[in-house]
Amino acid sequence: MTHRAMGEEALEEAGVSQNLLRLSVGLEDATDLIDDLKQAFEQTRTQGAR
């Protein structure tokens, strides 16, 4: 079940908030994952400054 199918009360009970970041990773090199996250966060920060 994904969080989208859950009601507000169930989300609260599960500890899922609007500012929760869910990250699912596979078998990748840790450095690659960190670099990918840094790039994504930087894009988000620069897009938000518009």
Image (spheres, rainbow, N blue to C red):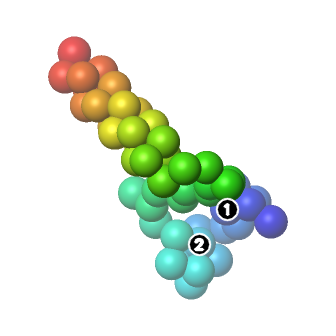
User: Is residue 23 visible to the viewer in this orientation of the structure?
Assistant: yes
Q: CA distance from mark 1 to mark 2?
A: 7 Å
Q: Quadrant of residue 2?
A: bottom right
Q: Quadrant of residue 20?
A: bottom left
Rendered location of residue 26, percent (x, y): 68, 54
Q: From this viewpoint, which residue is outermost toward the right?
A: 1
Q: Earlier in the sequence, mark 1 or mark 2?
A: 1
At horizontal 61% and vertical 49% (from top left) the residue drawn is 28
As drawn, the label of residue 3 is: 1
Circle 2: residue type: Leu
Specify few, some or many for label 2: CA neighbours under 10 Å numbering under 14, 14-19, or 20 or more: some
**Residue 44 appears left or right of 29:** left
Q: Secondary structure at mark 1?
A: helix
Q: Quadrant of the N terminus?
A: bottom right
Circle 1: residue type: His
Reading the image, the residue beneath label 2 is 11
Q: Quadrant of residue 27?
A: bottom right
Using the image as rendered, state which of residue 29 and residue 48 is in the foreground.
Answer: 29
Q: How many marks?
A: 2
